[in-house]
């Protein structure tokens, strides 16, 4: 077996007004259990999800309530090409709405990103397959918030209803 490793950066295209969650999981029922976590937590949730098998037929399994996002999830996960990963694109909701429930899904091992920012997945490939090395979520920091920034942050959280 070759010990060579090749690295690739895979861009995740997030549609306007959407958020994405990307993580590592295991077992074929991942896709159904994540689906149930979403619909049982956010009534009327609009999302598409995909899970990449790492053995057997090694298929991209997919479900969702929004066909556009379901197709996008499956195609994106195929491009990433790493077994035992999952991705969920959601519209009209935020990751914070489902994170605790998602973390409690027995197949979910790790959540690597939950964002609407530009997202890149750093992938390593060997003769055996591909794996996630890291994620790049958004941009590097430009500085430390000032008192004015603190005031704006606090006002924003109240404006969108996450604080009273």
Image (cartoon, rainbow, N blue to C red):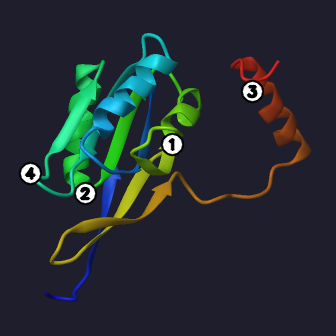
* Circles 2 and 3: CB atoms closer than 8 Å: no
> Regarding mark 1 in the picture, which secondary structure is present there?
strand
- Distance (Cα) linking label 3 and label 1: 19 Å
Residue 57 position in % (x across, y down) = 8, 51
Look at 13% across and 47% down and name the residue there: 59
Earlier-in-chain disc, 3 versus 4? 4
Outermost residue, left direction? 57
The residue at the point 48 percent across, 49 percent down is: 111
Q: Which residue is mark 2?
A: 83
Task: Tell me if residue 158 comes above or below residue 152 in the rendering.
Answer: above
- Residue at left offset 39%, top offset 45%: 107
Q: Nearer the viewer, residue 118 or 101?
A: 101
Which part of the image, by quadrant, shows the N terminus?
A: bottom left
User: Is the residue marked by circle 3 packed among few (<14), some (14-19), or many (20+) residues within 10 Å?
Assistant: few
Q: Which residue is mark 1?
A: 114
Could you tell me residue 76's position as x and y percent?
25, 44
Front in this rendered view, residue 129 or 34: 34
Instruction: Report the side of 72 relative to 157 (left or right).
Output: left
- In the image: residue 93, left or right of residue 124: right
Q: Which mark is residue 156?
A: 3
For the view shown, which residue lies furthest in the right direction?
Answer: 147
For the residues marked 2 and 3, what is the alpha-carbon distance in whole angstroms? 38 Å
Of labels 2 and 1, earlier in sequence is 2
- Earlier sequence position, callout 3 versus callout 1: 1
The picture places residue 112, in percent across and down from the top left corner, at 48, 53
Mark 3–mark 4 Cα distance, whole angstroms, equals: 47 Å
Q: Quadrant of residue 135?
A: bottom left
> Circle 1: is it few (<14), some (14-19), or many (20+) Cα within 10 Å?
many
Find numbered disc 3 in the image and state the secondary structure of the residue it sits on: helix
Q: Cα distance, mark 4 to mark 2? A: 11 Å
User: What residue is shown with label 4?
Assistant: 57
């Amino acid at each position: 077996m070759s010990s060579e490793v090749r690295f690739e950066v895979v861009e995740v295209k997030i549609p306007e007004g959407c958020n994405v969650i990307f993580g590592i999981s295991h077992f074929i029922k991942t896709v159904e259990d994540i689906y149930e976590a979403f619909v049982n937590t956010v009534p009327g949730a609009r999302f598409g999800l995909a899970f990449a098998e790492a053995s057997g037929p090694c298929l991209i399994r997919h479900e969702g309530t929004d066909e556009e996002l379901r197709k996008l999830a499956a195609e994106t996960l195929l491009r990433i090409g790493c077994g035992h990963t999952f991705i969920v694109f959601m519209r009209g909701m935020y990751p914070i709405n489902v994170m605790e429930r998602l973390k409690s899904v027995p197949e979910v091992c790790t959540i690597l990103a939950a964002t609407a920012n530009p997202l890149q997945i750093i992938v390593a490939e060997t003769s055996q397959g591909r794996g996630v090395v890291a994620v790049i979520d958004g941009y590097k920091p430009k500085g430390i918030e000032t008192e004015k920034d603190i005031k704006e942050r606090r006002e924003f959280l109240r404006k969108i209803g996450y604080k009273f």
